[in-house]
Image (cartoon, grey):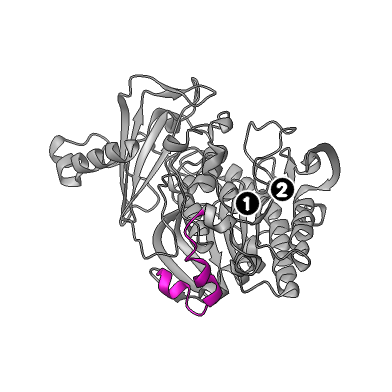
Amino acid sequence: MSHTSQPQVGRRNFLAGAAAVAASAAVPGVAGLAAANTAAAASRPNILLIVTDDQPKHTEWALQKTTAWLADQGVQFTNGHVTTPLCAPSRSSVFSGRYAHNHGVRNNQASYQLDQSTTIQRYLKQAGYRTGLFGKYLNSWTLSQNPPHFEDFALLQPGYVDAQWNVNGTVQTINGYTTDIVKNRTLNFIDKAATDSRPWFAYVTPYASHGPRTPEAKYAGTAVPDWHGRPSVPENNRDDKPAYIRNATGTLAEGKTIRAEQLRTLLSVDDAVQAFKDKLQALGQLDNTLVIYIGDNGFSWADHGWTKKSVPYRPAHEVPFYLSWPAGGLGTGTTDNRIVANIDIAPTILDAAGITPTHSVDGKSLLSGFNRDHLLVEWWEQGTNAGGPPTWASYVAKDKQYTEYYDLNTDTNGTVSGTGQVRFREYYDFAGDPYQLTNKLYQATPSDEQNLGIPALASQLAADRTS
């Protein structure tokens, strides 16, 4: 890919040449949008939001058609993150623009804690958008219960082949490969734009590249590029790491297997994204469709011996993140190196649609010129997770990361209990240690901590966790 550098995208530049979209931005809020006439509604952008499952960075090989569109003809965010590296909390942050400690979905069992009135689908539907969901929704959501604020949906019970679905209120088994089914249902939804003048919002969520990582038959034997690990994979001395990492047993061979399986499942996602582009082009809707692509969390390929997510190490919370909107001024390949996250998706979508949310959001519109200097990333232990990470929170900047682990856990409703005492701390200097091999707080003296700026970082982290 060839990109020009674009450190930040201001809203004024973003909307250059998009008179219809800019005019719609003057509509103040949900009530006003709902009353807008058909012509004004039709001028607002369509929105295609694609959220993959457990997809880390460095998977571009499997997404060559996707990146040719969304990166080479849009924006690639090089510092994309999720604020909680776990499926349901992350997706709830996508929907609401809020941190998990504010939306309440702190673990995968707490999906019903999300206030559905704070979601982008609610705002968009009430503003006159046609709304659709195709694929995975929220962990622990009852399949037979319809997802609120979606008028057309095929809700997947997670799986790859011959899975169960709730299709517009009817639970049924649909034979076939689920990514292909997600693709076809989405294409049918988009195709209705030929006869329905309303702008539309499609939330598209294939199960790839989540375990068991079953590839489509045609890709089952596909050879993937060799990979020999990174310095964090064979890390032999983990004495400076917390106990669950010291006891982790993941190997380079396991990391290679996970990576290869993920890449093969993502090849089908790449086919689907290309089909979406072709359909939009055929309908003449490619220019005024805002497309956002993100992974709901990353995944460790045996980094520090860990072969899962849920940890405060970069492979778990850094994700691929792309955006394209030619009518909004983003139709050529640029890179944006701001620290951005899943909490920024809802504010961006609402901003593009000219909707002012009535609930507080933690994220910022990517159409604005904001440029944060750090991000809060957080995760909660559910119950007593023997062998897993304790509850933690992390201050993540471009050049460093500071993490605290706490004596806290959650129940199935996401309710937090415990003393809150700090149990372990980590500090990594990314400039000299991008793979997080040396925890500079291990056996550090008070003087060392002062020199690292730990008191100020700890104070900021405490403020972020309650903001």
Tell which of 33 and 225 is nearer to you.
33
Does 40 sit above or below residue 144? below
**Residue at image mark 1:** 125
Q: Quote the CA–CA distance across marks 2 and 1.
A: 8 Å
CB of mark 2 within 8 Å of CB of mark 1?
Answer: yes
Residue 133 on the magenta segment: no
Residue in the image at 44% along x and 23% along y: 409
User: Is residue 284 rendered to the left or right of residue 340?
Assistant: right
Residue in the image at 77% along x and 64% along y: 191
Does 320 sit above or below residue 442? below
Say which quadrant the C terminus sits in: top left
Tell which of 434 and 67 is nearer to you.
67
Of labels 2 and 1, earlier in sequence is: 1
**Residue at image mark 2:** 151
User: Is residue 197 rendered to the left or right of residue 50?
Assistant: right
Say which quadrant the N terminus sits in: bottom right
Residue type, label 1 = Lys
Q: Which residues are magenta?
A: 9-29
Does residue 249 appear in this view?
A: yes
Does 291 sit above or below residue 411? below
